[in-house]
Image: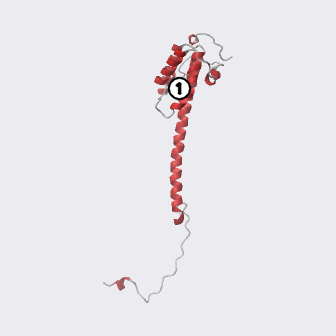
Amino acid sequence: MKVKSFQGNANARPAPPMTLQPVVEPGLIPSPDVPMAILNRTYTATAKEYLYQLYSHLKAVEQLRQKMVKVVQCVTGVNHENPKILSVKMDLTQHQCYKDAVSHYKTHCSDWFSTEYGYHLRHLYALFNLCGSGYRTDCILMTIEKVCLVEERNLQSGCCVYRQGCLRRRVSSFH
């Protein structure tokens, strides 16, 4: 066979011109815009991943805060001083109580090697204030265990009840 047999008939009429329908599919991208579309889709996928990571991080930080709030509430009961204990930084008078409470909190309530480690440190002053307010060390330690144990088991019931014996003495440090 020769090439001329594949070239068609020289005397044939040309085909009528074709009219193409406009492309209305939204997923199709014109050739010049393809690099920009690739970058846009890559960015969108990455942004969603980063937003998810950010959300997870913020959720973990809020859980840490809630955990410390629960410890304070369980030790003190429903008390008008709770907001002060959670926000004011008192003078440390009970050094051993604070050391024991931090050690216990570190052991039972947190992963100190996580990226949220810095947020643990932000809430330790609440333990500092509990010790300075005259709450017994053993009561604080027991409450830390109960709060963290309940959270690990995902129980929704209240883990502790206000115990009258937790307050060693009435200290008016906040007044």
Q: Which corner quadrant holds the C terminus?
A: top right
Measuring from the top left, give residue 45's x and y in whole percent.
Answer: 51, 50
| Residue occupying the far left of the picture | 1
Residues packed near mark 1 inside 10 Å, few (<14), some (14 to 19) or many (20 plus): few
**Residue sitting nearer the eye, 19 or 121:** 121
Q: Quadrant of residue 124?
A: top right
Mark 1 lies on residue: 156
Q: Quadrant of the N terminus?
A: bottom left
From the viewer's perspective, is residue 51 above or below residue 166? below
**Left or right placement of residue 5 versus residue 62 in this view:** left
Q: Which residue is outermost to the bottom?
A: 11
Tally the marks. Answer: 1
Left or right of 4 in this view: 52: right
| Residue 108 place in picture, x, y as percent | 47, 23
Q: Residue at x 63, y 25 (%)?
A: 87
The correct choice, above or below, for 120 with respect to 11 in the image is above
The residue depicted at 44 percent of the width and 87 percent of the height is 12
* Colour scheme employed for the rendering of this structure: secondary structure
Q: Position of residue 41 (x, y in %)?
A: 52, 54
Please tell me whether residue 52 is drawn above or below residue 98 in the rendered image: below
Depth check: 35 or 26 in front?
35
**Residue 49 shows up from this direction:** yes
Q: Image height check: is 87 above or below 7?
A: above
- The residue tagged with tag 1: helix, strand or loop? loop
Is residue 153 among the parts visible in the rendering? no
Q: On the image, which quarter does residue 135 sit in? A: top right
Label 1 sits on what residue type?
Gln
- Most extreme residue toward the right is 175
Residue at figure coordinates x 63%, y 12% from the top left: 171
Please name whichever residue, 75 or 114, is drawn nearer the observer in this view of the structure: 114
